[in-house]
Image: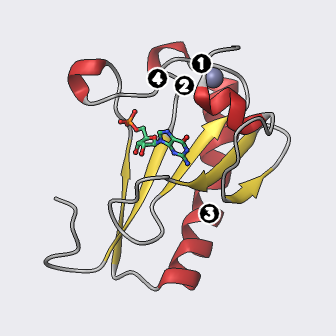
Amino acid sequence: MSNCIFCKIINGEIPSSKVFENEHVVAFLDISQVTKGHTLVIPKVHKENIYELTPEIASKLFEVVPQIANSIKKQFKPIGLNLLNNNGEKAGQSVFHYHMHIIPRYGAGDGFG
Ligand code: 5GP
Ligand code: ZN
């Protein structure tokens, strides 16, 4: 989708710090990290939200989340980790290309929650 910021990240029009990429999925650091290592995982096809994901796309995405989570754990050494997905403006969604937040946690005062 031509005016989607995450589609532009996928096709390299906008720079990002990619931490994972395969045929179906890209993961990159959030530009405004709520905690160190805050990462977004997105499908390469433009789908607005959870309601638009097909089982195939959801499966391709979730298939790689454990390995991305493990590499974040290894690199940033958080003591916990949240997965978060906002759907709809009223739920806090600001970019309308489906994305899963991976938010490493470092204890009280880590800036999230
Ligand atoms: P949402 O609020 O839709 O759940 O999350 C959107 C996320 O995308 C936000 O955490 C925001 O910081 C991130 N974001 C928005 N624009 C960009 C960008 O151009 N590059 C990167 N890496 N992250 C972005
Ligand atoms: Zn898009």
Q: Earlier in the sequence, mark 3 or mark 2?
A: 3
**C-alpha span from label 3 to label 2:** 19 Å
Question: What residue is shown at x 52% (from left), y 17% (from top)?
Answer: 48
Picture quarter with the N terminus: top right
Q: Is mark 3 within 8 Å of ligand 1?
A: no
Question: What residue is shown at x 66% (from left), y 59% (from top)?
Answer: 17
Q: In front of the other: label 2 or label 4? A: 2
Return the residue found at the far front.
14
Residue denoted by label 4: 50
Q: Is mark 1 within 8 Å of ligand 2?
A: yes
Q: Earlier in the sequence, mark 3 or mark 1?
A: 1
Mark sitting on residue 91: none
Marks 1 & 2, CB-CB < 8 Å contact: yes
Return the residue found at the far right.
23
How many marks on residues?
A: 4
Mark sitting on residue 68: 3
Marks 3 & 1, CB-CB < 8 Å contact: no
Depth check: give the residue in front, 102 or 16. 16
Q: Residues within 10 Å of mark 2 (few under 14, many from 20)?
A: many
Which quarter is ligand 2 in? Answer: top right
Residue 104, image quadrant: bottom left
Depth check: give the residue in front, 28 or 43. 28
SS state under label 4: helix
Mark sitting on residue 47: 1
Q: The disc labelled 2 sits on which kind of residue? A: His
SS state under label 3: helix
Q: Position of residue 111 (x, y in %)?
A: 21, 67
Q: Earlier in the sequence, mark 4 or mark 3?
A: 4
Residue denoted by label 2: 97
**C-alpha span from label 1 to label 2:** 5 Å
Q: Earlier in the sequence, mark 2 or mark 4?
A: 4
Q: The disc labelled 4 sits on which kind of residue? A: Ile
